[in-house]
Amino acid sequence: MFVYNVKLNSKSILKILLVVMALIITFFFMFSIYKIVSESFKVKDQVNCSDVSVLTPENYTNILKSVHDNPDDYYRKKN
C-alpha cells in the first residue's frame, strides 16, 4: 500500500486558496463576457419591407439584417 504524507502549513494553504479563488473568478469573468457578447449581437426578429419607415437605434440591426437577407425587396425603395 502506498501512502503519501502531505504537510500543509499556513503559507501553502493560503497559496492553494488563492489559486482556487483566482480560477473561480476567471471562470465567472469569462462566462459573463461570453453571455454579454452573445446576447448583444443577436437579432431578435425579422422586419418586412413594408414595416420600415424610420431608422432608429432600436431597429437598426433588425433592418440591416433584413436588407442583407433580402436585397431585392429594398431595391429602389423610397420612403
Image (tube, rainbow, N blue to C red):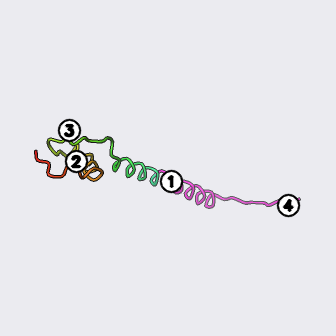
Amino acid of disc 4: Phe
Disc sitting over residue 27 in the figure: 1
- Count up the numbered dots: 4
CA–CA distance between discs 2 and 4?
A: 75 Å
> Height in image: 10 above or below 43?
below
Q: Quadrant of the N terminus?
A: bottom right
Q: Toward the viewer: 55 or 14? A: 55
| For residue 67, side relative to residue 77 (left or right) | right
Estimate the x, y position of residue 76 in percent, counting from the top left.
14, 52
Q: Which element carries disc 4, helix, strand or loop?
A: loop
Q: Residues within 10 Å of mark 3 (few under 14, many from 20)?
A: few
- Which residue is disc 4 drawn over? 2
> Height in image: 63 above or below 8?
above
Q: Find out whether residue 4 is within the magenta segment.
A: yes
Estimate the x, y position of residue 79 in percent, counting from the top left.
10, 44
Q: Residue at x 11, y 47 (%)?
A: 78
Give the number of the mark in front: 2 or 4.
2
Estimate the x, y position of residue 14 in percent, counting from the top left.
58, 57
- Residue range corresponding to the magenta coloring: 1-28
Disc sitting over residue 6 in the figure: none
CA–CA distance between discs 2 and 1?
A: 45 Å
Give the number of the mark in front: 2 or 1.
2
Lower position in the chain sequence, tag 2 or tag 3: 3
CA–CA distance between discs 3 and 1?
A: 43 Å
Q: Find out whether residue 45 is within the magenta segment.
A: no
Give the number of the mark in front: 3 or 1.
3
CA–CA distance between discs 3 and 4?
A: 75 Å
Amino acid of disc 1: Phe
Q: Residue at x 21, y 43 (%)?
A: 49
Give the number of the mark in front: 2 or 3.
2
Estimate the x, y position of residue 9 in percent, counting from the top left.
66, 59
